[in-house]
Image (cartoon, helix red, strand yellow):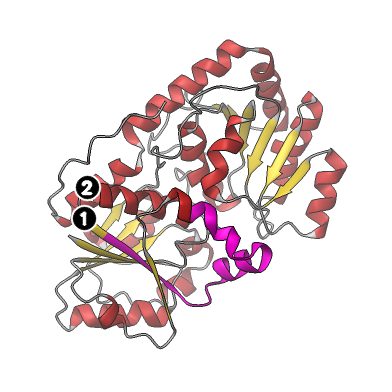
Amino acid sequence: MRIAYFTHSLTSCWNHGNAHFLRGVLDALIARGHEARAYEPEGAWSRENLVADHGLAGLAAFEQAYPRLISTIYPADADPEALVEGADLVIVHEWNAPELVARLGTLRKRGARFTLLFHDTHHRAVSEPAAMRAYDLSGYDGVLAFGETLAEVYRGWGWGNRVHVWHEAADITRFHPPEHEDEREGLVWIGNWGDGERSEEIEEFLLRPARATGLPLDIYGVRYPKPALAALKRYGARFRGWAPNALAPGIFARHLATVHVPRRFYVEALPGIPTIRVFEALACGIPLVSAYWDDAEGLFRPGTDYLVAHDGAEMTACLADLAADPQMRAELVANGLAMIRRRHTCDHRAAELLALVGAPAPAPAATEEPA
């Protein structure tokens, strides 16, 4: 099967979380014997910012970690019909230009033989519904939504049983515990400050508890404005800047625990949808404490796979307990890792996608299970 995926960027993960899952699931599809290729527009802001900050060397970690992935960078005047020639399945991520989305839909309405799916992995359907409804999806065969509550939004827009829940997941080929454990110290948080969607929450659930417990805190990410950097300095956190996502397993392996601080929209308007960092952290075998989010779909076992804090005081208590109790840390790691491997790998999602479109799904080549 030939699969074409139109993304904002495959090569850059600079403030672009969809690239994490996309890399893993395309690689899993290739491992199952399918041809999978990404297409990203010339001048994509994620890649432009990455290269501006770090030069082309900033792309090296991706290229080394995913040698068989191919991404074609196409110009604004490219002919979409030429790009998808011979494709059996075309998936278009929601962070694409409306013009491209419409032109691919027109091809399908005119008789193109590929299956055409729209993939939504963001909160704009509830935070900016007018912008999302402006997309012309009339030629699309279906929608892939990364959570049930988002799927419900599309059902309300008339998609009925043509919207399918397709959760994100961890690429356990690369995101797994270290082969050899070294000394771990302090907390780590990998995430972007963003647009004020969780500024107060970061202070309550991350900065204050870290200082209260005396645990050193390393922070990786981008888009930290001057007030945010001043806050990190005030609380004694060490800002490390951007790190390629492919290097995240090694970063996790150096730390005692990590914290998840969900964005407000995923707590209030789209419950049940964790970000990719939850899957990746558990896959890497690091104890996780999360600010509360409603696991409405039962993806995990809150309190068993990770600890939950409803406020800053509970977060402080959880982190203090973890720091003092190696057995608790070991149990969380084992439980979270088992759940990821049982239900939430990119190979699971590849199999789900292939079943959805009715494609043959040969078993992946045998590989040595990660440590």
Q: Residue at x 57, y 71 (%)?
A: 45
Mark 2–mark 1 Cα distance, whole angstroms, equals 6 Å
- Magenta residues, start to end: 36-62
**Other-residue count near label 1 (Cα within 10 Å), few / some / many at <14 / 14–19 / ≥20:** some
How far from the left and from the top, in percent, is residue 120? Answer: 40, 61
Residue 272: x, y in percent?
A: 44, 43
For the question of whether residue 292 can be seen, the reply is no
Q: Closest to the observer: 235 or 309?
A: 235
Q: Is residue 25 magenta?
A: no
Image quadrant assignment for residue 368 = top left
Amino acid, disc 1: His
Examine the rendered structure and indicate whether residue 73 appears above or below residue 55.
below
Q: Which residue is mark 2?
A: 32
Question: Is residue 202 visible in the rendered structure shown here?
Answer: yes
* Rendering quarter of residue 289: top right
Q: Is residue 149 left or right of residue 211?
A: left
Q: Is residue 208 above or below residue 76?
A: above
Looking at the rendered structure, the secondary structure element under dot 2 is loop
Q: What residue is shown at x 66% (from left), y 69% (from top)?
A: 52
- Callout 2 environment at 10 Å: few (<14), some (14 to 19), or many (20+)? some
Q: Is residue 148 left or right of residue 321?
A: left
**Residue 133 rendering spot, x and y as whole percentages:** 41, 73
Give the dominant element type of the magenta stretch: helix, strand or loop: helix
Secondary structure of the residue carrying tag 1 is loop
What amino acid type should be assigned to the residue bearing mark 2? Arg
At a point 51% along the width and 23% down the height, the residue shown is 303
| Image quadrant occupied by the N terminus | bottom left
Q: Quick one: quadrant of the C terminus?
A: top left
Q: In front here: 300 or 238? A: 238
Kindly identify which numbered label has been placed on residue 179: none
- In the rendered structure, are the residues bearing label 2 and label 1 in contact, judged by CB atoms less than 8 Å apart? yes
Residue located beneath label 1 in the image: 34
